[in-house]
Image (tube, rainbow, N blue to C red):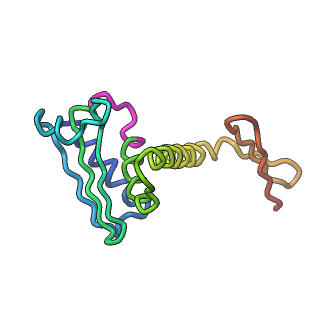
């Protein structure tokens, strides 16, 4: 299955990039309809893409993947990063998942933004009078980073 291969490849890439190689991570894939209903049903009867169970005390985590749900996923990297960030922030969980989901979503977006910035760097630097300048298009404005030579 091509999607499962893409998911595995993304996990391998992002486990390394996010510094999680010292964790004992187990990734399990499910495609049985009965197991999917029992493992991935959310409170509002929606089925989630994945469930992450982490024990920060022992640096162990299990990520269960709802394989059929990933057929509609356009950005596999984003979904994988999201689940791995759950592993990173697990110890800050307070009284439920609502706060953790917001933090995980924002950290995921920050990581993807940083990766995108890295890709665009080569096209964004210009030399003006001995200073290197870089214009960064932020969400609500523009910032300029300058470095004297």
Residue 55 sits above or below residue 146 on the image: below
Residue located farthest toward the right when viewing the structure as drawn: 129
Residues rendered magenta in the picture? 71-78
- Residue 30 location (% of width, % of height): 16, 42
Image check: 90 left or right of 115? left
Q: Quarter of the image holding residue 2?
A: top left
Q: Residue at x 33, y 68 (%)?
A: 59
Split into 4 quadrants, where in the image is the N terminus? Answer: top left
Image check: 5 left or right of 145? left
- Residue 63 location (% of width, % of height): 27, 52
Closer to the camera in the image, 66 or 73:
66
Residue 17 visible in the snapshot? no
Q: Residue 34 in magenta?
A: no
Closer to the camera in the image, 43 or 82:
43
Residue 53 sits above or below residue 140 on the image: below
Image check: 106 left or right of 48? right
């Amino acid at each position: 299955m091509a999607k499962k291969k893409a998911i595995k490849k993304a996990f391998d890439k992002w486990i390394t990039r996010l510094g999680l190689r010292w964790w004992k991570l187990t990734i399990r894939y499910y495609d049985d309809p009965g197991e999917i209903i029992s493992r991935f049903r959310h409170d509002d009867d929606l089925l989630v893409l994945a469930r992450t169970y982490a024990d920060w005390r022992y640096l162990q985590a299990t990520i269960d993947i709802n394989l059929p749900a990933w057929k509609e996923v356009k950005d596999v990297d984003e979904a994988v990063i999201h689940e791995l960030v759950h592993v990173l922030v697990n110890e800050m969980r307070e009284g439920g998942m609502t706060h953790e989901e917001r933090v995980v979503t924002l950290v995921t977006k920050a990581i993807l933004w940083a990766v995108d910035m890295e890709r665009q760097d080569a096209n964004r630097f210009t030399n003006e009078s001995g200073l290197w300048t870089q214009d960064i298009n932020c969400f609500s404005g523009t910032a300029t980073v300058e470095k004297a030579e």
